[in-house]
Image (cartoon, rainbow, N blue to C red):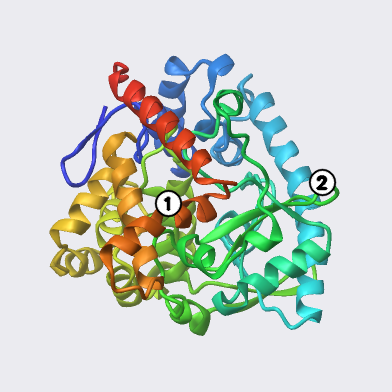
């Protein structure tokens, strides 16, 4: 069990590493005796037949750090080297395909910002083998999101199923009367772009693109990303032009995304943030980070993430920045939502999501009558969720209520 910077206990899944994951991180990030001691202790706890995905994604970084610190004959190295080699080969193919796509987008006058692992591999790790990725994340201008979807569709990509909670058991939903289908081009409406921040598109001959029109999750106004675009830096990917976020904005995105509850804590965010901080050093604009956190309502997750990062020597978290973030008041609603986002999902989490969707619906619905707005809300949800009818919404809602209730009743892991 871990305790977050706010004093909140986190067990089982979460945002912060478990004991074993923390040892793995320290063995992957720290030098000398600290690396060797953490690795030795991790081996006493590890079971390589049951490695969680978060830990597995650290193996390439672990491999390189162990070699750099004189551990060259441990039998585990063969496994770590294999993961590094596979990651390197996969990412070489992925970035070659991404380069072709970026060149096509550039030829059509569509700028793209690399996000998440895509940007980190290019700008901070400097080695395609160190940063496993499942897809390539790119950001396009919000006002051109539909155009970007149309371009990708024309180039052979197709949308994935609309991301929803509880879609792991497709068979159960199908038996109940709703079989989720891929999102059609005609279903990318203005209201969908308002509610969502991005969408996966897949091309079997290439790879998966996570297309973003907003950097951060949650409600975003049409001009919310303007500061990100204004400070973005130009880079190339295998010769093709692209952009990356300002380092402070990149760190903001990593921390805000990492500090969300997950069944397997997404511990990769710790290594990503450390890579940014170690490269940028004192050059990172901490004032910009604090201002961005305030502007986007993510002060609490960013502050908590930075406090945790401060436990790693030489990462270089600014105490002045933490004091500045501490001084930014957080409202009751923001604190409540942060508590929900960093806790196991349940009924409350579903109600928060529903409240977010209601607010988003209200912003785009000019009908002054509350009853009319309420009656129109189910139709809005069916369109946003990619459903064929309100009946499907009823099926999904009932299924989710049962699923979340069962999950809440399960004993929590210690």
Tell me the residue at 40%/26% (across/down): 403
- Count residues near mark 2 (Cα–Cα under 10 Å), then give few for <14, some for 14-19, many for 20+: few
Give left or right: position of 196 versus 234.
left
Task: Please state the horizontal and vertical placement of residue 333, each as a whole percent of the image.
Answer: 18, 57
Res 258 seen here: yes
**Residue 19 versus residue 201: which sits nearer the camera?**
201
**Residue 166 versus residue 174: which sits nearer the camera?**
174
Whether residue 321 is situated above or below residue 187 in the rendered picture: below
Which numbered circle lies on residue 378? 1
Tell me the residue at 58%/50% (across/down): 386
Instruction: Give residue 410's quadrant in the image.
Output: top left
* Residue at mark 2: 204
- Residue lying furthest right in this view? 205
Secondary structure beneath dot 1 equals: helix
Give left or right: position of 66 versus 414.
right
Task: Please state the horizontal and vertical placement of residue 204, each as a whole percent of the image.
Answer: 82, 46
**Residue 96 versus residue 75: which sits nearer the camera?**
96
- Count residues near mark 1 (Cα–Cα under 10 Å), then give few for <14, some for 14-19, many for 20+: some
Secondary structure beneath dot 2 equals: loop
Instruction: Give residue 175's quadrant in the image.
Output: top right
Instruction: Give residue 98's quadrant in the image.
Output: bottom right
Task: Please state the horizontal and vertical placement of residue 394, each as a whole percent of the image.
Answer: 45, 37
Q: Specify the quadrant that holds the N terminus.
A: top left
Which one is earlier in the sequence, the residue at label 2 or at label 1?
2
Gap in Å between the C-alphas at discs 2 and 1? 34 Å
């Amino acid at each position: 069990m871990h305790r977050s910077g706010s004093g909140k206990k986190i067990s089982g899944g979460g945002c912060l590493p478990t004991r074993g994951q923390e040892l793995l991180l320290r063995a992957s990030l720290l030098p000398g005796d600290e690396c060797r001691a953490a690795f030795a202790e991790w081996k006493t706890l590890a079971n390589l037949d049951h490695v969680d995905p978060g830990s597995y994604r650290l193996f390439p970084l672990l491999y390189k750090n162990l070699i750099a610190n004189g551990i060259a004959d441990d039998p585990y190295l063969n496994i770590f080297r294999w993961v590094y080699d596979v990651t390197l080969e996969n990412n070489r193919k992925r970035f070659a395909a991404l380069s072709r796509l970026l060149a096509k987008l550039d030829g059509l006058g569509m700028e793209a910002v690399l996000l998440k692992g895509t940007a980190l591999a290019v700008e901070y790790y400097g080695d395609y083998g160190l940063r496993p990725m499942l897809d390539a994340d790119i950001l396009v201008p919000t006002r051109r999101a539909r155009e970007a979807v149309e371009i990708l569709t024309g180039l052979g990509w197709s949308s994935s199923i609309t991301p929803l909670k509880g879609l792991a058991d497709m068979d159960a939903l199908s038996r109940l009367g709703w079989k989720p289908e891929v999102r059609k081009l005609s279903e990318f409406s203005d209201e969908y772009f308002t509610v969502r921040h991005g969408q996966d598109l897949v091309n079997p001959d290439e790879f998966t693109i996570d297309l973003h029109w907003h950097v951060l999750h949650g409600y975003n106004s049409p001009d919310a990303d303007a500061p990100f675009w204004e400070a973005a830096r130009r880079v190339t990917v295998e010769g093709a032009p692209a952009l990356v976020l300002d380092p402070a904005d990149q760190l903001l995105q990593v921390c805000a995304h990492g500090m969300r509850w997950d069944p397997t804590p997404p511990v990769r965010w710790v290594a990503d943030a450390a890579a940014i901080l170690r490269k940028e050093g004192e050059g990172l604009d901490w004032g910009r980070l604090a201002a961005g956190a305030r502007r986007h309502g993510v002060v609490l997750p960013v502050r908590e993430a930075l406090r945790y990062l401060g436990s790693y020597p030489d990462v270089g978290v600014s105490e002045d920045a933490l004091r500045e973030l501490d001084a930014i008041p957080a409202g009751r609603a923001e604190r409540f939502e942060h508590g929900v986002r960093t806790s196991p999902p349940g009924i409350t989490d579903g109600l928060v999501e529903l409240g977010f969707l209601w607010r988003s619906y209200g912003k785009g619905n000019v009908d002054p009558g509350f009853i009319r707005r309420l009656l129109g809300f189910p139709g809005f949800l069916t369109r946003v969720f990619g459903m064929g009818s309100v009946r499907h919404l009823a099926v999904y809602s009932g299924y989710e209520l049962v699923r979340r209730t069962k999950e809440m009743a399960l004993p929590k892991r210690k």
